Image (cartoon, rainbow, N blue to C red):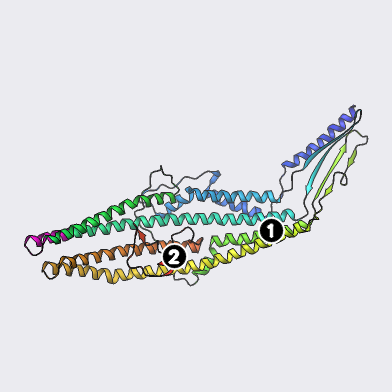
Amino acid sequence: MNRLTSTRTAGMVGVFGVGLLLAGCKGVPTKSEQAARQQAETVAAQFRPSDHKPALPVLRADAVLSNYLTYAMLNQPSVEAAYYDWTASIERITQARSFPDPQLTFQMDIQNVVTSIMPGLMGNIPWPDKLRAAAAVASAESQAKYFTFQSAVLQTAFEVKRAYYQLYFLAEKIRVNRQTLQLLSDLEKLARAQNEVGKVTLQDVLRAQIEEDRLRTEIANLEDSRSSLVAQFKAALGMGEQEVAPPIPQQFESTSLDLTSDKLFETALAQNQRLKAMQAEVHAAEASIILARKGRLPDFSLGFMGDAKTDPTLYRFPGNPGTMSLPIWRDKTAAQIAEAQANKRSAQARLSAEEIALAVDFAERSYLYREATRELALLNDQLLPKARQSLEVARSGYLAGQIDFLNLNDSERTLLGFELDKVEAATQREVVLAELSLIVQGMSPAGGAMAPGAAGSIGGKQSSLKKAGPGGM
């Protein structure tokens, strides 16, 4: 190879080396991609700054509930998984709108000696707007992932609230039972005193002791159930089994929700993250239809080659290394379009089904809230005062020998039942409020939240005031 040929070869290699550097260039982001990345930066600044978990709030007994909610949102693995699913989907937008990597080609003709040396560069060029359409599909799918992430945040907040309310009202239930146990102890002393003066038999004392033993066992069962609720509370906070359970907040905080608003359900339809995710899926299906229709159009492969052995240098342009795809399989293209259209109809149907389910859930929880509110008013204003008065009358009647111990014990049981019903109704009211808040802000609780009827059940017992109603109440 002479000096001139070597120089030309080096020049051609340099030219194509510059071409290889194009692989390090950046494409032009779409508007939706820019918006998604800006959104991700805003969220990451609080959720995962510098891709690391931020400092978690210190959980103390005097901490407010919002500290626990923040802790759970930052620490819950399910929220973190949804977050990285979303950020990964943003990267797929860039991949969808980018051109395929260029290819370096090299050809040599050899007879007795090398007669030609032809390095070259070739690239695939999709039909105009195909990449933009693919980016639109990826962008819509990324938005669906974002709303799924938001739903995971709200679902975690609900799980924390539910466990918190159940633990708080479990303590209330234990308190009521212990107060009743003290009352039973007083009744036993009363029966002993009556037995000592010969007014009643020892049977009354034994009946009082039987009631005390039964109530002690109930208290032990309730205290034992606390460990499972604490485990649920830790799980909602994203804490592992080996981690020490945090103290339960001492100050009770109810969910704030204006249920008097006539537009509350319209707000739920507008803000619900689950519905927004499904709407994004519809948009993705619409973009897929556009992309499938562009499958009828050809793609190109263009490039050039240069022969460093010739003088002057011989270049080959499109026509030799250039190619064009021939989308001749019309049934294949038609099938792709039909698939995209069917996916759109499916997404629209799921969206409609979710809207219907949302309306049912909203009406059901609204009824349960009103029911629990009425029960609390009935218990506080009428039943509990009368039950306490009835117990005092029964006590006086027992001392006077006008009634037997069975009637006195029945009055005690009635008061205890109403006290426990009050705890159950208050528990249901708070959990249903949290569920309604979840529906308005995030998603339908039908799949992951407490089913109707279970909200008012702590320690395996259900309120005696529950009537037949929606959801098997």
Please tell me how many numbered marks the rendered image carries: 2
Does residue 200 show up magenta in the picture? yes
Q: Mark 2 points at which residue?
A: 257
Q: What element carries label 1?
A: helix
Q: Name the residue under label 1.
A: 288
Judging depth in this view, the residue of 324 and 40 nearest the camera is: 324
**Bounds of the magenta segment:** 185-201
Does residue 297 show up magenta in the picture? no
The answer to whether residue 36 is visible is yes
The answer to whether residue 294 is visible is no
Q: In this view, does 305 lie to the left or right of 424?
A: right
Picture residue at 68% right of the left edge, 62% below the top:
341
**Residue 452 place in picture, x, y as percent:** 42, 64
Q: Disc 2 marks which amino acid? A: Leu
Q: In this view, does 271 lie to the left or right of 232?
A: right
Judging depth in this view, the residue of 90 and 10 nearest the camera is: 90
Residue reaching furthest to the left:
197
Q: Disc 1 marks which amino acid? A: Ser
| Residue 469 position by quadrant | bottom left
